[in-house]
Amino acid sequence: MLSHLSPEERSRKILSLILEELDDDKAENVVTISLQGKSDIADAMVIASGRSQRHVGAMADKVMRRLKEAGLGRVRVEGATTCDWVLIDAEDVIVHLFRPEVRDFYNLERVWSEAAHAPAKADA
């Protein structure tokens, strides 16, 4: 499903699938940060909270399942054993799912928002 799309369309489709699933799963405080032109790791980052470890784990499972069903077979995940902070690497989009207090502690929105607004590095 994703293989026939251009890189830009593919990135947008992956982001759309993730945001739809998080909305369906009642994720809280969903934030999307564009990383295009600012980082080589991904085009976008999504940060969201779940109400508990169980909620975070369920959201992560459903996001990963939905991406695999769409044809993205190389989805990687970290933190699924404790579900305090689950990172999903969906190639073009990085997803961080947190319990609220863990999210507050790491404050990735501030860190990455500042990085996203910093001037782009010129290649040497």
Image (tube, rainbow, N blue to C red):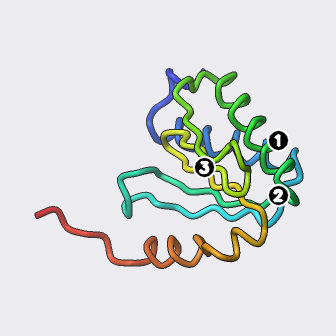
Q: Earlier in the sequence, mark 2 or mark 3?
A: 2
Q: Is residue 82 left or right of residue 72?
A: right
Q: In the image, residue 36 lies at what x, y percent? A: 43, 58
Mark 2 in CB contact with mark 1 (< 8 angstroms): yes
Q: Is residue 48 left or right of residue 123?
A: right
Mark 1 residue type: Ala
Q: In the image, residue 32 lies at what x, y percent? A: 63, 61
Q: In the image, residue 95 lies at what x, y percent? A: 62, 51
Q: Say which residue appears at 57% left-offset and 78% top-offset.
A: 110
Q: Residues within 10 Å of mark 2 (few under 14, many from 20)?
A: many
Mark 3 residue type: Leu
Q: Earlier in the sequence, mark 2 or mark 1?
A: 2
Q: Residue furthest front?
A: 82
Determine the secondary structure under disc 1: helix
Q: Which of the image's four quarters has the N terminus?
A: top right
Q: Which residue is mark 2?
A: 50
Mark 1 in CB contact with mark 3 (< 8 angstroms): no
Q: Earlier in the sequence, mark 1 or mark 3?
A: 1
Mark 2 in CB contact with mark 3 (< 8 angstroms): no
Q: Tag on residue 72?
A: none
Determine the secondary structure under disc 3: strand
Determine the secondary structure under disc 2: loop
Q: Say which residue appears at 61% left-offset and 39% top-offset.
A: 14
Q: Say which residue appears at 16% left-offset and 62% top-offset.
A: 123
Q: Tag on residue 58?
A: 1
Which one is in front, 110 or 124? 110
